[in-house]
Each structure stands twice: as C-alpha cells, then as structure tokens.
Image (tube, rainbow, N blue to C red):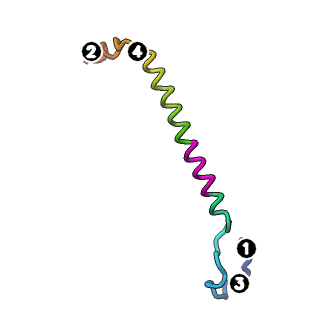
Amino acid sequence: MSTNGMSDWAVDLAETGAVYPLQGWEVPMYVIGLAFWLWWHWAQLRQEATEIRHETEADASGDQARDAIARY
C-alpha cells in the first residue's frame, strides 16, 4: 500500500519530496487544531465561571464557610 505514490524505495529520496502520509494537510490540520484548542479553553472558562457562580450564590453570606472553618 502506497500513500505517496512510490512503488520502490530504490530512488534518490532528495528528489522525491515528502514521504509521509497526508501530504499537504499540514496547514488545514494546524488550523483545525488551533480552532479546537481555542474552543476548548473558551468552553473550560465558561464551565468554570458557571461553577464558581453557583458556589458563590449558594453561600453568598459566607456563613457556611465560617461554620466549616470553626468546626476545624
């Protein structure tokens, strides 16, 4: 099975170019990876902000935190 069109390795590899699969997909894969990375950070920040907001709303006065500290 050949992914680069070569049928024989007995050639000058300096003249053949890239010999790895998915040649020419470097830039689209970089853009896809960068977009996923940015989306993941955005989703993480939203989820953490929601969690922090719920935690603060649950104990807005701080009484529960002071009681927990006082127990120890």
Sequence-first disc among 1 and 3:
1
Tell us which disc is closer to us: 4 or 3. Answer: 4
Sequence-first disc among 4 and 3:
3
Give the residue number, with chain letter if any, for mark 2: 71
Tell us which disc is closer to us: 2 or 4. Answer: 4
Looking at the rendered structure, the kind of residue marked 4 is Asp
Sequence-first disc among 2 and 4:
4
| Residue 32 on image: x %, y % | 63, 52
Look at the image and tell me in which quarter the C terminus lies. top left
Q: Quadrant of residue 15?
A: bottom right
Q: CA distance from mark 1 to mark 4?
A: 63 Å
Q: CA distance from mark 2 to mark 4?
A: 17 Å
Give the residue number, with chain letter if any, for mark 4: 59
For the residue pair 70 and 16, the one nearer the viewer reads as 16
Element class at badge 4: loop
Give the residue number, with chain letter if any, for mark 1: 2
Give the residue number, with chain letter if any, for mark 3: 8
Element class at badge 3: loop
